[in-house]
Image (tube, helix red, strand yellow):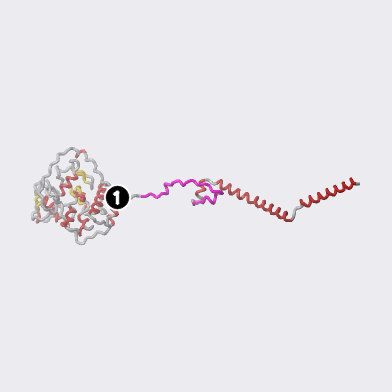
């Protein structure tokens, strides 16, 4: 009986334990709700994962070119493409995009410093206000002879920069086929501000060797009183020489240029260097050494030009006042009958070539 009760008690205890186990395992309403939320979260996570993965794949597939430019050539922000920041390489220099600084030539700088104004003259041009070919230093040689002495090449002859011609001369400083040209003509200077100068300045300017050059008489007549906008030497090196000297002379004497002259000089300055062009070697026929004759010193006396240095007119007037075409040269046709004949004071020295038969008398009736 006792054992029978014990078995019954154990059986009831077992039933109790089974009932308790079922009660513990049965989910509550809150647990069910949490389980539903967990399932939903897992579903959302599984739905988002492919999109994030695709972005990462796209980011990894980008080439270096697509990182910096898009198809339209616009810059793309790398931060909008990469999923995580990565160190950027230092920018490499791009020489093609760097603006080049063009340095102005010395000639252009000097040219642009000149006043650009229309040509003007307070009073009509008067060549006689520019006395020239003086013997400034009293050495017995007037300005013409001094220029010829300075420009004679290797005791051989002269080179005309305007037209590229060589000339041996007649010995010593006798060069009747060559003229001494005012690079900035006296008339051009007059119209560029010299009309208001003092008499002393006009006299000095007329004999300023910076503004003088020995050239063929034909090229001197071709140029006349014209400026660089109206005439240029046919020789290219002569054009560069003219450019440099015009700028130097007008800068030194504070003369203006007009717009046409400025344009012409600017075009030359863009192609010419700042150095005086070199003179070519003389032709073989002039390269033979020629004895240099010492020029006969002429008496120093007041002069306004060739008139009192080389010629004496019949009425004693200055021959230079009869330069009708203002080209720096005189011919017999320009002289009135009252001044003829003209005495050539130094035999063989006839810069105006008036003594055709070399008898010492020019423009004979």
- Residue at label 1? 106
In this rendering, would 251 be left or right of 98?
A: left
Q: x and y percent of residue 78 in the render?
A: 52, 50
Question: Which SS type dominates the magenta stretch?
Answer: loop
> Is 258 inside the magenta-drawn segment?
no
> Along the line of sight, which residue is nearer the eye, 328 or 132?
132
The residue drawn where x is 14% and y is 43% is 172
Please say whether residue 352 is visible from this viewpoint: no
> Is 91 inside the magenta-drawn segment?
yes
> Along the line of sight, which residue is nearer the eye, 23 or 256?
23
| Outermost residue toward the front in this view | 2
Q: x and y percent of residue 121 in the render?
A: 22, 60
The magenta segment:
74-101
Quarter of the image where one finds residue 116? bottom left
Quarter of the image where one finds residue 250? bottom left
In this rendering, would 339 be left or right of 208?
A: left
Please say whether residue 184 is visible from this viewpoint: yes
Position of 195 relative to 145 (above/below): below
Q: Give neighbour class at mark 1: few <14, some 14-19, many 20+ (Cα, 10 Å).
A: few
> Along the line of sight, which residue is nearer the eye, 355 or 73?
73
Q: x and y percent of residue 314 in the render?
A: 8, 54
| Outermost residue toward the bottom in this view | 122
> Along the line of sight, which residue is nearer the eye, 203 or 87?
87
């Amino acid at each position: 009986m006792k054992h029978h009760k014990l078995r019954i008690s154990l059986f009831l205890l077992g039933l109790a334990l089974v009932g308790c186990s079922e009660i513990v395992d049965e989910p509550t309403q809150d647990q069910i709700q949490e389980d539903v939320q967990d399932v939903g979260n897992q579903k959302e996570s599984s739905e988002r994962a492919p999109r994030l993965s695709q972005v990462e794949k796209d980011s990894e597939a980008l080439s270096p070119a697509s990182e910096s430019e898009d198809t339209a050539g616009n810059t793309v922000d790398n931060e909008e493409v990469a999923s995580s920041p990565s160190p950027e390489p230092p920018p490499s220099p791009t020489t093609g995009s760097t603006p080049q600084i063009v340095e102005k030539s010395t000639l252009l700088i000097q040219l642009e410093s000149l006043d650009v104004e229309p040509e003007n003259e307070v009073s009509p041009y008067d060549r006689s206000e520019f006395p020239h070919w003086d013997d400034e230093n009293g050495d017995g040689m007037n300005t013409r002879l001094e220029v010829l002495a300075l420009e004679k090449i290797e005791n051989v002859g002269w080179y005309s920069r305007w037209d590229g011609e060589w000339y041996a001369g007649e010995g010593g400083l006798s060069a009747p086929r060559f003229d001494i040209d005012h690079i900035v003509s006296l008339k051009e200077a007059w119209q560029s501000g010299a009309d208001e100068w003092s008499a002393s300045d006009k006299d000095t300017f007329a004999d300023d060797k910076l503004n003088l050059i020995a050239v063929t008489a034909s090229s001197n007549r071709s140029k006349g009183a014209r400026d660089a906008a109206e005439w240029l030497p046919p020789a290219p090196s002569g054009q560069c020489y003219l450019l440099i000297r015009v700028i130097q002379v007008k800068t030194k004497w504070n003369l203006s240029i007009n717009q046409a002259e400025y344009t012409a000089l600017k075009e030359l300055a863009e192609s010419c260097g700042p150095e005086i062009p070199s003179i070519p070697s003389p032709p073989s026929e002039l390269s033979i050494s020629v004895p240099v004759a010492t020029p006969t010193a002429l008496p120093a006396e007041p002069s306004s030009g060739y008139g009192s240095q080389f010629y004496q007119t019949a009425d004693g007037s200055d021959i230079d006042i009869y330069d009708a075409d203002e080209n720096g040269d005189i011919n017999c046709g320009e002289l009135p009958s009252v001044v003829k004949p003209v005495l050539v004071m130094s035999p063989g020295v006839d810069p105006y070539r008036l003594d055709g038969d070399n008898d010492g008398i020019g423009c004979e009736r």
